[in-house]
Each structure stands twice: as structure tokens, then as C-alpha cells.
Amino acid sequence: MLYRRFAGGTVTDQIFKEGFHIVFPWNKMTVYDTRIQQKGYSLSVLTVEGLKTELSLSIRYYPRRNALGILHQQVGPDYLEKVVIPEVDNTLRILVGKMTIDELYTSRGGGLQDLITRSISEIERNYVIIEDVVLRQIVLPKRVEAAIETKIEQKQLAEAYQYRIAAERQEVERKKLEADGIYAYNKTVAQSLTPDILKWKGIQATQALAESSNAKVIVVGNGGNQLPIILGGEAGK
């Protein structure tokens, strides 16, 4: 942008493009970068409880090309420090001032980032485009961080305890089901073991023992309907 000392000051209706230009010594040419630029900085804000929090930000911006004359005339080349950063600061202080420290932490900046994105149109001047404001980091007070870490640790311990209780309950249910199955099986078997079947099984077992090659068998009558008593010993005795 060209400033003419003796011819009306800043030329607002003409933008000098790249290339060679002749500038009289009493005039001044100011060069503006119209590409997308990025600025990182940090600021301290207070939550609704009055707790101090550090925010690390990154602003992506560029001057509106067709408004460079007005920008140069009303603000100047240091528009970042005079306009962009103060407006972003003001918006963030208002937003964070309405949030509790818990809301700020639990959202991990996600909720705040959404609010910042929606507020870009409010902090954007007619002659400066703020393309994005990225929240890179939230630094909480040390005592708050310690309290939150303790809270998370206690929560994890409580969840682990509840998990163990649930596991023990499942084990109780498993053992109960196993016991019910064994009981049902024994009941069914007991109902099927009639005296005749038991006598027949006893005869089969007696016969198998009597036919054993290494047994010397003595059969003694047991009387009645009872099975015979078999006394035996190893061969050779």
C-alpha cells in the first residue's frame, strides 16, 4: 500500500501488485502478506469459579485483499497485535468465563473449540479473515490437576472393585448352575436304579471278578436275595 505524503495520504483505491514500482522519497510503500499466516500464543483466562487457566492457541488468518487500503489507513501493518489477537482474547475470556473448570477439563477443549469455531464470525473484522482458531493445549492449575488425577484414580479403583464383585457373582451363578446340574443328574440316576437293576449289575461285577486270572475265589452263600460274598487273594498265596 502506498502512502503519499503530499497527495492525500493512503491510497485506498489501488493495490500495488508484485513487481517493480517507483516510489518518491517523501512517500512510503508498505508491503502486506496476503497469504494465510499462522500465529501461536498463550493467554491466561479465568473460569466461572475464578480459577486461572492457561490456553495455548494457534490463529490462522490473512488480510482481505480488497480491503487492504482501509486496513492500512485505519489500523496499519501491525493489525495482528491491534485487532486479531485482542478480539480473540476477548472472545475466549467471555466463553471460558461462563464455563466451570470441570466442563473445561472433561470436554478436553472439544466443547470450547466448538464455541470458538462458532464465534469466528463475530471476531472477524471486515478487512481481516480469521480462517481458524485452534485450541492446542489447556493447562490447569496444579492443585486442580492433582485433584482431578485423584478423582480419576478413585473412579478407576471403584470400577475395578465393581468388576471384581460382578465376576464373583458370575462365579456364584456358575457354581449354582453346576450344583443344580449334578443334583438333577443324581436324582435321575437314583430314580432309575431299581433293586432288580442293582442286583443284575452286582451279578455282572461278581462274574467279572470270578473270571479274573489273578484271583483265587472263595464263594460263601449270603442267603436270601442278597448277592454272594466273594473273598479273594492274589494267585500263588
Image (cartoon, grey):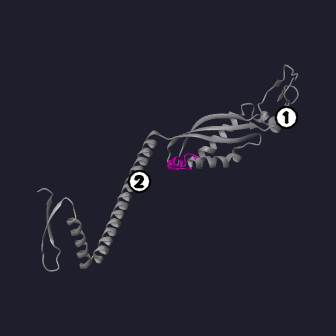
Residue assigned mark 1: 12
Q: Using the rendered view, name the quadrant where residue 202 is placed.
A: bottom left
Q: Amino acid at mark 1?
A: Thr
Which of the 4 image quadrants contains residue 82?
Answer: top right
Left/right placement of residue 133 relative to residue 206 reads right
Residue at 56 percent of width and 47 percent of height: 97
Horizontal relation, residue 210 to residue 136: left or right: left
Q: Residue at x 70, y 47 (%)?
A: 122
Task: Work out which residue is located at the far bottom of the displayed protein and give it.
Answer: 224
Q: How many marks?
A: 2
At 12% from the left and 78% from the top, the residue drawn is 223
Percent of width and height locating residue 42 = 59, 36
Provide the residue span drawn in magenta: 98-109
Direction top: furthest residue: 25
Looking at marks 1 and 2 on the same chain, the residue that comes earlier in the sequence is marked by 1
The relative height of residue 17 versus residue 127 in the rendered view (above or below) is above
User: How far apart, in angstroms, are the residues tagged by discs 1 and 2?
Assistant: 66 Å
Find out whether residue 106 is within the magenta segment: yes
Kind of residue at disc 2 = Glu
Estimate the x, y position of residue 215 in percent, counting from the top left. 17, 61
Mark 1, Cα crowd under 10 Å, few <14 / some 14-19 / many 20+, is some
Kindly identify which residue carries mark 2: 159
Say if the magenta span includes residue 167. Answer: no
Compared to 146, does 225 lie above or below? below
Q: Position of residue 157 (x, y in %)?
A: 39, 50
Task: Please name whichever residue, 36 or 206, is drawn nearer the observer in this view of the structure.
Answer: 206
Relative to 206, 24 lies left or right: right
Query: x%, y% of residue 237?
Result: 11, 57
Relative height, residue 58 to residue 121 (above, below): above
Q: Residue at x 74, y 30 (%)?
A: 77
Between 2 and 42, the one nearer to me in the picture: 42
> Which quadrant of the structure image shows residue 19?
top right
